[in-house]
Image (tube, rainbow, N blue to C red):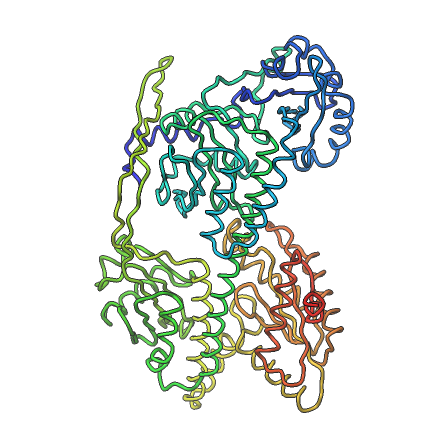
Amino acid sequence: MPHKITPELAALQAQCNREAVHAPGAIQPAGCLLCLDHELRVTVQVSANIEQILGVTVAQALDARPSRLLGAGLINRLRLFLAKELQESGRFPGSLIISRQINGRRCRFRVIAYRHQRRVLVELEPIRHLEELRLLPAVNEWLANIADAETSDSLLHLLTRAVRSLTGHDRVMVYRFDADWHGTVVAESRSEQASGYLGHSFPASDIPPQVRGLYLVNPVRSIPDATVEAVPLVSATAEDQEPLDLSVGMLRAVSPTHLLYLRNMGVKAALSVAIQSDQVLWGLLACHGLAPTPLSPLVRDAVYTLVQTATQRLFLLKARDETAYLRQVQDCRERLAEEQGGFQNPLSLLQQRSQAWLDLFNACGVALLYHEQAYSTGQVPPAADLLKVGGWLNSHHRGNGLWCSQHLAETPLATEVELAGCCGLLAVPLPIDAGEQGGEQGWLLLFRDERLKSYRWAGRLEALQHREEGQRIFSPKRSFETWFEEVLEQSEPWLPREQRAALDIGEDVTVAILVKAISDLNGRLTRVNSQLKGIATTDALTRVWNRYRIEQAIETDIDLAARLGQPSALLLLDVDFFKRVNDRFGHEAGDRVLTTLAETIGQGLRGSDYLGRWGGEEFVILASGCHLEEGVVLAERIRKAVAASDFGSVGKVTISIGVSQWRPGDNRKSLLERADMAMYAAKQAGRNRVMSEVDLERIDS
């Protein structure tokens, strides 16, 4: 933690979390605001600075019809969209610029319009005339450079330089959140006068939950001058004085707590843009000015465009890295499948595959618990303690999927076993003999040693208290001097992709052990066959074929195609945005989605089609006797059926499907690779669609 949470700090954080930052009752003086009735016929509220912006007094503005203040053209456009986009999104779509005659001069304004209950709010920000000519060439050049970035680090540093060149801020940073919402500066561009924060971390309390939530509503927050007074909103009548939700706009006044924070930091202007993917806040682009930094709406729009482009590039690079990792997982699983039956006992299986697993999971040791025996390699606790780990998992976590920790010293295991220097554990259940009465569930255990890490925290936070109207009020006192914290007895965290890969490999290990048991224990065929049906060939969740069984069917069909010339098509499908389902509704809801999906697909198959779960949210359909065109028709029928199905509280679920067809010389791997490439192309093309290997050839040509 960045600092000890005292009762005073806890009270300060609770006070900050209650602050109504979305409805401050005032705006920043960079523009003006008008609040209109839902029919756009009456001006209900205006900002007190409207005379400086539009050349009419507050009284005149409240007495005038909106069409006179804003022009009939804008009012008509607002009225046109009121029944459409504004009802759905709450904000006028796109960028709108109007021109008005103010005190004998033609002035241009950027317009943002949005709803608050039965009110329509209109913000006007002045625009200087020659900004477009200066901006366009610079933005285009930076966009081209961003699109060519090949690493995340180079991309983010390029983004900070690009934004600082456009805005003139003294410091531009990219700030990444961790799982606890602490942020670390991972890229920075600054002037000589500005302090550097690259590599520094900021506590989660610096950006409280309600502020993070606002970034999901409005990704841009601009504070061109933190030294000026906020401009209050003036109402026509006492009945119209309720606070307005200004979350969607750009002029929302800054909370006193944040102004004090900026003052403590020596910052007099700020601009923040959210970096997000699938409605998850990854981080922020944060700009600081040591002096007030007026920012034109067009420059701000250009910054947003740069951040959006960089965000797309960032997550594309991360997707490439994810794909490379998944290929390693796939290769590891392929080799394990090829070696099934080729080991004498679980120890020999572990010896054959342990190095690949250690490399894949960056682990220091691996252990296999099976039939109350512990097989291990690398740095792990003693055998007796490994069995205690398995016993604890079976007592406290049986039937609940994998279990992981990056800080074993803080878990109950630390008091029961000798950890032998291991700080992290990823435990994968192996459902072998678990169904027998008194049977112990097996486990694949991956251990990590200590990761020595030091945090550079940007200052300390104190809570000062005083009384105001008889109430105890807290205010933050924040220094930004660097202090260091060493994190001990912790390993690298287990990433979600590593957890998914471990589950897949655990399933393969289970199948491999069972296949070996079948070949070795013919005399106990009945019991082993029941396990094979329930585990080795059927996916426990969806009750369709598992990977091992569908692979066998594919091999058989390829052999028939090669010998008899029988056509064979393969469909590989993946649930769109499945991670979002798990994150938002939980893994149990995700499991229900997969179960419903398997049932829906099964209802649309022919007697000669075979469905198997490939891993995670991926499924394979073997369309035996089908040409490519027939396979595409089948895929489209399934896609439509899934899109029309009821998935309960999760809502609509869609799938992307890739289709390939057997060609002379194909093996299972090449046939699957083309289907996988087609599915990936379907994802890239927008998801919820079908693409075949022929479509790939058209794209390549």
Q: In the rendered view of the protein, which quadrant contains the N terminus? A: top left
Residue 600 or residue 560, whichever sits in front? 560
Q: Residue at x 24, y 67 (%)?
A: 381
- Residue 201 x, y percent position in the rendering: 35, 42
Compared to residue 75, the image places residue 333 above or below, namely below
Compared to residue 525, the image places residue 334 above or below, namely above
Q: In the rendered view of the protein, which quadrant contains the C terminus? A: bottom right
Residue 229 or residue 627, whichever sits in front? 229
Residue 475 or residue 286, whichever sits in front? 286
Q: Residue at x 61, y 33 (%)?
A: 298
The quarter of the displayed image where residue 683 is located: bottom right
- Residue 551 x, y percent position in the rendering: 56, 79
User: How many numbered marks appear?
Assistant: 0
Compared to residue 361, the image places residue 526 above or below, namely below
Q: Residue at x 58, y 58 (%)?
A: 593
The quarter of the displayed image where residue 68 is located: top right
- Residue 451 x, y percent position in the rendering: 29, 57
- Residue 275 x, y percent position in the rendering: 51, 44
Judge left or right: residue 101 versus residue 593. Answer: right
Judge left or right: residue 569 versus residue 311. Answer: right
Judge left or right: residue 15 versus residue 5. Answer: right
